[in-house]
Image: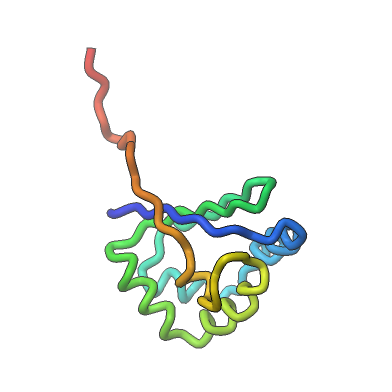
Amino acid sequence: MPRYCFCLQVRPERMAEYAERHRAVWPEMRQALRETGWRNYSLFLRDDGLLIGYVEADDLAAAQAAMAGTEVNARWQAEMAEFFTGLDGRPPDEGFLLLTEVFHLPDNERESA
């Protein structure tokens, strides 16, 4: 399954609240993510506000489009937008920067002697 990594910048003064909100992601948001093809989704927050996201999806653009069509995502993105810098009016799920994978060690890779 394809892997995707992205980054955003959380406002330093809002980091604690951002982390708190993600400890209690709405059940309907979690369900919508699953139903629209987001798998193995994780967010990591550095102490300067750099947010790194990792997600697996058959097709990230299709998963994003499916989420964009849900009412719960519209509510969530509206609430989360105030936590970020550099979005230029875009919702967070449309404003992140995708990173290029340069290395991956598969679980099933066999060691060579």
The x and y percentages for residue 94 are 45, 72
* Left or right, residue 37 beside residue 110: right
Q: Residue at x 52, y 52 (%)?
A: 52
Colour mode? rainbow
The quadrant in which residue 104 appears is top left
Q: Along the line of sight, which residue is nearer the eye, 37 or 69?
A: 69
The x and y percentages for residue 39 are 40, 60
Image quadrant where one finds the N terminus? bottom left
Q: Residue at x 26, y 31 (%)?
A: 109
* Left or right, residue 60 beside residue 12: left
Residue that protrudes farthest toward the top in the picture: 113
Q: Can residue 29 be seen in this view?
A: no
Look at the picture and state if 47 lies above or below 1: above
The x and y percentages for residue 21 are 69, 66
The quadrant in which residue 112 appears is top left
The x and y percentages for residue 78 are 60, 81
Q: Residue at x 36, y 68 (%)?
A: 37
Q: Along the line of sight, which residue is nearer the eye, 61 or 13?
A: 13
Instruction: Count up the numbered dots.
Output: 0
Image quadrant where one finds the C terminus? top left
Q: Which residue is drawn at 53% across and 83% down?
A: 74
Q: Can residue 95 be seen in this view?
A: yes
